[in-house]
Image: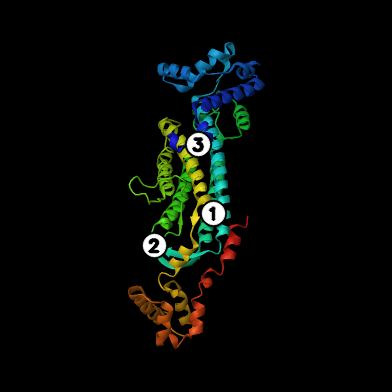
Amino acid sequence: MIPRYSRPEMTLIWEPQTRFQIWLDIERYACEAQEKLGVIPRGVAQALAERGNFEIERIHEIERELKHDVIAFLTNLAEHVGEEARFVHQGLTSSDVLDTAFAVQLTRAADVLMLNLDALCAVLERRAHEFRDTQCVGRSHGIHAEPTTFGLKLAYAFAEFDRARSRLRAAREEIAVCAISGAVGTYSTIDPAIETHVANKLGLKPETISTQVIPRDRHAMFFATLGVIAGSVERLATEIRHLQRTEVREAEEFFEAGQKGSSAMPHKRNPVLSENLTGLARLVRATVQPALENIVLWHERDISHSSVERVIGPDATITLDFALSRMSDVIDKLLVYPDAMRKNLDQLGGLIHSQRVLLALTQAGLSREDAYKIVQRNATEVWQNGGTFLQRLNADRDISSKLNAKELDQIFDSNNEITHTKEIFARVFSS
């Protein structure tokens, strides 16, 4: 991922220095276990701990000749370790190192993403409570429907990202596996106890059964989870973009001092961060399909998945890390305009209470079909010609014969529609 959308902690996970260090750790832990089993002489693991080193450029230089990255690494490692290097990597195959290291990187990435989700949920919870009772219009199909509160909008987002935390925890657990099982995964040249030792050292668990590679359905689920989280980012970003439209202007991104919105129009205040998040979400989701296609490999292994994962591993996690951090900042500083929300609530002259009128008429004795026709007739008149819905209803004998003015006034109290807000909040934030 380009530096513009990268943050240091996540980027570090995917640096060559980190990757090769994990490879070295895997080799050293494998040697520790093999020494205990008497497979190799004592002192090899100590030699790796003391003299184990590598140079990235030297590895690349060797790889250009050998066309094999793991052998290039082992060759460079041997240049530092010396005689004991002949016992390194005994019984292992390249995928043992590559797949286990990739698992370490993905679990570390998941830990960073989990911290991001924690931070986002915290700011969503705080601001949801801040606007719990701030009424605004709810919209379906982009059209005014019934009253809701801005706090409920944020509570909905909190619940969605709270589910994301659960999904990411599960995806992390599924991907946190180690495979040190040798060629075609049969342990023919390496004892399973070595795999267990390496797994414990790295905070992983042994793969149940591998075919020289860790099964890629695990990776597909991991990237699919990231894709779903990205979808949630875009859903919230899109809501902010809609609310910032000039005709709505119920909320908007914070506009920094000295910030400029347009090179041509000095008045512009554009939702550029939310638009950016929409684009970043598309990039993360774009990694899901190739991850799914990586499930299918030839027989016990091929490397068709390798080139894909070298790209989508860093790109998906770095991009989502940046997006989640940016979303937290957007919500934290979001400007909210309750007066505009009230103005928009009243924009249609009370039509947002039509359902309650319909229900009251059915309870007063009318059939649902007749009540619907009467209410829709009056609503259409207000929709097309303006005026207030309440006045028109009071003037309609079909309605006034069933509901008196006091009863209609009670129906048009907008607090009716948000009676259960506290109950909803209690459910959402019970944990």
Q: How many neighbours does mark 2 have within 10 angstroms: few (below 14), some (14-19), or many (20 or more)? A: few
Which residue is the site of mark 1?
158
Q: Are marks 2 and 1 in contact (CB under 8 Å)?
A: no
Vertical comparison of 334 with 98: above or below: below
Secondary structure beneath disc 2? loop
Q: How many neighbours does mark 3 have within 10 angstroms: few (below 14), some (14-19), or many (20 or more)? A: some
Vertical comparison of 231 with 409: above or below: above
Q: Position of residue 266 (x, y in %)?
A: 37, 49
Mark 1: amino acid: Phe
Q: Are marks 3 and 1 in contact (CB under 8 Å)?
A: no
Q: How many neighbours does mark 1 have within 10 angstroms: few (below 14), some (14-19), or many (20 or more)? A: many
Question: What number is the disc on residue 7?
Answer: 3
Secondary structure beneath disc 1? helix
Mark 2: amino acid: Gly
Vertical comparison of 356 with 161: above or below: below
Q: Position of residue 56 (x, y in %)?
A: 49, 20
First in sequence: mark 2 or mark 3? 3
Question: What number is the disc on residue 142?
Answer: 2
Q: What whole-number distance in Å separates the C-alpha atoms at marks 2 and 3?
A: 36 Å
Mark 3 vs mark 1: in front? 3
Write the residue at 42% across / 50% down. Answer: 271
Secondary structure beneath disc 3? loop
Q: Position of residue 232 (x, y in %)?
A: 47, 51
Q: Are marks 2 and 3 in contact (CB under 8 Å)?
A: no
